[in-house]
Structures are given as C-alpha cells and as structure tokens.
Amino acid sequence: MVDVQTLREQLTQAAQSARIVVRCLNGGRDAQDSSQRAIMLLVDIQEFLYRLKDNISWGGDKWLVEPARLVALAELLACFESTAKSIELYFQSGGVGVSYYRKNLLERTFLPRLEQYKLLLLLSLQPNSGERSSLDRKIRATVTSWREVESGPKVDLQFEENVLSITSGQASDHFITLADLCNRRLQGTGQWIFDHYQYRRWLMGSFKTLYCVGPAGAGKTFLSSLIIDSLQRTFTSSDVATVFVFCQDEKEKEQTTRDLLQTILAQLVYRKRSLSYASSSLYYSESLMQGNASPKAYQNAIRTEVDRFSKVFLVIDGLDMLSDKERFLSRLQKLPEQVQLLVTLREVGQVGDASYITVLAPPEDLHLYAISRIQNDSNLNSLLTDDSNLLLYDDVIDTVVERSHGVFLLTKIHLDLLSRYADTKALERALFQLPHTLSEAYGEAMKQVVSANPIATRHVYWTLYAIRPLSVGELKSATNTGETEEENGSISFEHSLQTQSGGILTVDAVSGTVRFVHRTAREYLSGAAARVFFPTAQKDIAETCLTAITLDDIIDDCYYNGGTTPRSTGSGFLSYAAMYWGYHARDVAEDEKAIQVLIKTFLNKLLWRRPPMQVLTNEPRIPSELGLGKYPQDWTPLHFLSYFGIVGKSKRLLVQGAKINANDNSFKITPLHCAASRGHDEMAEFLLDSGADGNAVPEMAAQRYI
C-alpha cells in the first residue's frame, strides 16, 4: 500500500535526480547529438513527473489514485531512481573518461531506457483501458529487469556516517568563525555593498565571478561575513548552498589549494547530509592510503556535489594568503554554471569575464565605528562626552575618519592610540599627529608599547616569533604575567591585552589563541621593525624555553613514553617549550654564551637521566616532532642538535670529541639522518664537510620513515 504523500515525495525526488543527471550530461565532454537528446528526454520526464504530482495532489481523476496505480507508479519511480544514479555514476566528473565509451554507453544503453521511462510516465497520465494496460505491462517488464543490473556500488553505512561526522566537524569550524565575525561586526556598517550596481548584477547571475578588491584593513573580511549572512538568510531552501572559506593567516601551517578544496567539499556534503558516489570514493580512497587525494580528485568531487544543488554561492575571503591562488581560482572557474563566486583580496590582475568592486569603508561607516568605540572605551568616553568637550568630540571623530582613508583598521589603531592619553591637552596634541598609513600607525603604536610597557612588549614578540599560536595561558606563562589590576577588576585579559599592546594584539574568539589584530601587523613587525623594537627577542624566547624544561621532572617527562600522557601536561607552555626550544635557539647568535650554556645543560641532563638501556622503547622512525613524551631515549646530544639544525653548538661538540657518525641506538640512526629528515640543508652540509658518512644506512624498520 502506497499513500499519496509518500508518492508525492518520490515524484519530487525523481525530478531532482533528473535535474542532477541533466547537469552531469551538460558538462561539455560528450557528443552534442546524444547528450542533447538525453537532456531533452530528461526535460520531458521532469515535466511528466510534475504533472503527475499535481494531478495526484488535486485528486481530480479518481482512476489516477487507485491503489494499484499508485503501487505501479511507486515501482516505476524506484526503477527510474536506479537508472538516474547509474547515469550519474558513469557521467559525473571523474567517471568514465574515454569519449568513445561514454558516447556508446549513452546511445546504446541509457537513451533507450530514458525513452521507455518517458513513455511509461506518459501512460501513467492516461485513464484505464485495455490497450494502455497491455503496453504498460510490456514496457514495465523490460524496465524492471534493468533494475537488477543497476544496483550500483554498495554503500557502507558506517563508513558514510563516519565521513559525515568528519565533514560536519570541518564545516563547524568555519561556521564558528562566521558567527564570531557577525557578532563583532558593527550593526549598520557595510550596507553599501547591497546597493552597489555590480553586486546586484552578480547576485542576479549576470556574471559568474565578482572580485572585491581593497587595501589591507579596509574591512573585506567583515564585508564577506555580511554578504554570507545575507545570502544564508535570503536563500534558506536545501536546494541552495552558501559555501565560504576564510583564508586566515594565524594558522599552524600554511594553507594550500587542497586545504581550501577540502573545506569546500566538506561544506557541500554537510549541506546535503549525504555523499555522492564521487565524494564517497574520494574519502574511501583516502582512508585506504592514509593520505590526501589530489586537488584534481577534490575538484571532481566538488563538481559532482555542486550538481546536486540548483544554486551555489561560493565566497572566498583573503585569497592573498594562498601562494598558488591563480591555480586555485582556475579550478573554481571550471565549476558548473550554477556556481557564483565572490572573492576578496588586496589586488587582482586580469579580471577577464568577471567584474570587481573597490572596497573602501564609506565615511558614514567610519563615523559609526568611531562613535561606538568612544562609547565603549571608558577613558575616551570620560574625556570626550563631557559637555565642555563636545567640540573636541567632533574633532576627534572627523580627524580620525579623515586620516583613515577608508580603512577600518586605521580607525581602530587611531582610537587605540588616543585612548592611552589621560588628559584632553595631550589628546589634542596627539590628534593632529595621527599617522596616515598602517605602517606609520604600527610604528607609533610600538613606540608607545616599548617605551612604557615591558610586559606588553614581551606579549608582542612572543606572538610574532612563536612557532604556533599561543593560548592565553601559554602566553602568560611564557612572559611570566600575573593577574593585572585591570583583570582583577571588571576588565578582561583580552581588553587589557588590546589596550596595553596599542591595539596590535587580540584574542581569537574561536581558538582562544593570541594573534595579531590583522595580518599587516605581522608583516610590518617581521621586517626591519623587528630589529629596532625586539633586538634580543629570540635570545629571550630561547632562554625562557630552555630554563623551563631543564628541571629534572620535566627532563624525565621528555623521553619517549609510548603515547601515555606526560605528568607535565598541566602547563601548555612546557609542552611548547619542549617541542620548539631548538628552533628558537637556532636563530640566536653563536656568541650568546648564556644560550650555549643552557643548551649544554639540557642535553647533558637528557643523557644523565635517560632510562636504563634494557627498558628502551623507541618508535622505529625519526619523530615528526619532539616534545613531552617524544624524545628518543638513546640519541646523543649531536642527534638532537642535528634534528633542530643548530650548527654553532654542533661545532663545539665535535671539537669536544663528539662522534659524528654515532649510531649506537635502536635503529642505527646517525645525526646526518636527523638533519636530512628535517630538511636542514646547512646542517647536513656541515656534517658532511666534517666527515659524516653519507652512505650510512639505518635499520630496515626505520628506513621507510627517513
């Protein structure tokens, strides 16, 4: 027994499957005559499906909703679904690749089947008669036999559930980022984009790609969040997807084209809550090879997922952060026509068949931001909102807006600089010396920080030089920062950090790590400014790390422990110091005696406190990273120095008699193996010049990992 509501849902699903097949065939790879014929048949089939749905819904023809007719129609729809999935499997991007076989498969197998489905659906619209029933039975017998050979690949439900869980987690990270941006965006700003002529044309589909181009700090990321939020609120049906990527710079590793394609695919899968054959095959192959598929494989899977939607809006923010952005854009441009692409970046080359909008904050938005900031800053509010200072209030807003030149970030830094003054006279003098560029603004902010606040200075250079982003707790431990008077009151550490660092640092709301307020701050401080403001930063960082991990209890927790949790994990900074001290020490000048002594002390303790030889338990490989519970128990000091690429101290060890080819360990690994495995060319060259055996071979268990 089939009820009308269930059948209506089947008809809707069948129409959607027909649309997906049309898009698969419309990719341009197949012969025009056969593919166009198949598309026309599918269009007719869709029309019949919608007519059947309407007629059944209205119930005007009683014969159409007879139980026997409903059962027969349900069986026909199940057969059509099976055929549609087979066509999708063979003709999706990455399916059958040889044109000859695709052409013959379409002409000899699927075109006749589509013709018969069309006829059966047409018969389903006819009233009962003996002739209709006879023809229906003959064709139906053939169609039913196809279903037995169109079963398609078997679906591993547990595997699919695991993949959906993983993609849900990947998508959730970006949803949290979007929510944070929407919460921080000032209400009422950015509305100009919706009235822009080019944006309206892009939204209506006049062209595929729209570039939003503007200088650093102009507010492109917040504008992206506004556009994404608007698209999601406008297009709420499951047939439309708004997919987005924020190319953030505060990552532990540089993002690649594959990383961004993974994010896009994960969001598309998450939107449908199911996997296409292409996506399922991709994730299954990755699980078998325990690695990542190629960008081309991801592109094919994305094409297939896109075909399951009537419209996909794809927003990519901050594409400047991607080193191979041209290749990535080329891949996105090849996606099906229902994809509309919006990209924000600082500059764009040849636009081609696309258009662009210049992103600069209008004065009205900057005024709104300045007013809001003054209201929420206790110091500025007390100085400027007094009745006697109303003229100064207007002057501050007008001057800040004028000198920001359409850049939100400049407005923020200007107000951060002004908020440090305690009286109106000093504020007035500073007002007319406000910088005109971001570089000048960062320079002025750092002058104030370095001259007035040593702790804030340490916060800045630790954030600049840390190998990975530090949490608030790790940064406090690294800089020996206690609870400030502000924190003991009602002001949070985040607010205190922003104020004391001149607006240069902030706390990421998603990850909880300390980062620069904008990537341009890191770019500025990574240049010549670092030598001016932080001449001894690397020495201080290396000294702090080595001092923290030289305690006996911490040394004991460094040795390889088979994956058990070390006792010292209560402090995240200890884990950081044990993992990265060598990278910081490598960047310190060789004549810094304090660092050389600390390195010697740490390495000597590793030798003195190592476990007895009979209980050694090392992995059969050179570790991908060192840290608490990961230091091999039978390496020499030269092994560790080679692993980190510290040439200066290695020279001293060799002079003192260290064995350059030492391999008295579980898997005959030499210092040269350590240097080569980590890509330290200078270290490897030094070892070879000093007499290292370039032909030394580790034991077979370790060879695969070097």
Image (spheres, helix red, strand yellow):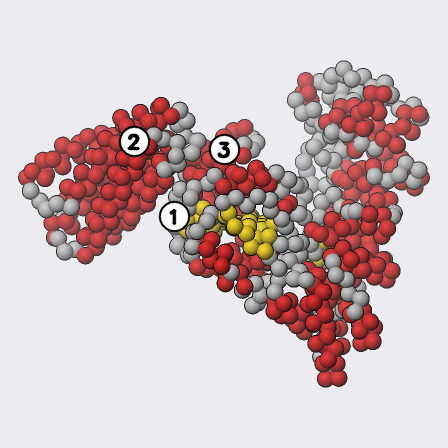
Q: Judge by depth and name the residue closer to the eye, 158 or 224.
A: 224
First reached walking from the N terminus: tag 1 or tag 3: 3
Looking at the rendered structure, the kind of residue marked 3 is Ala
Q: Which kind of residue does numbered mark 1 sit on?
A: Ser
Q: Which residue is mark 3?
A: 297
From the image, tell me which residue sits under label 2.
34
CA–CA distance in space, label 2 to label 1: 24 Å
In terms of image quadrants, where is residue 121?
Answer: top left
Is label 3 in a helix, a strand or a loop?
helix
Q: Amino acid at mark 2?
A: Ser
Q: Residues within 10 Å of mark 2 (few under 14, many from 20)?
A: some
How crowded is the residue under tag 1: few (<14 C-alpha within 10 Å), some, or many (20+)? some
Q: Residue at x 72, y 70 (%)?
A: 399
Residue 561 visible in rendering: no
Mark in the foreground, 2 or 1: 2
Query: Residue furthest toward the left?
Result: 130
- Residue 455 picture quarter: bottom right
Q: Nearer the viewer, residue 138 or 248?
A: 248
Q: Which mark is residue 76?
A: none
Query: Is disc 1 placed on a helix, strand or loop?
Result: loop
| Residue 436 in which image quadrant | bottom right
Q: Earlier in the sequence, mark 2 or mark 1?
A: 2
Q: CA distance from mark 1 to mark 3?
A: 22 Å
Quadrant of the image containing the C terminus: top right
Where residue 593 sits in the image (x, y, percent)? 93, 39
Residue indicated by mark 1: 310
Q: Is residue 503 visible?
A: yes
Residue 147, image x and y in percent? 26, 32
* Residue projecting furthest to the top: 695
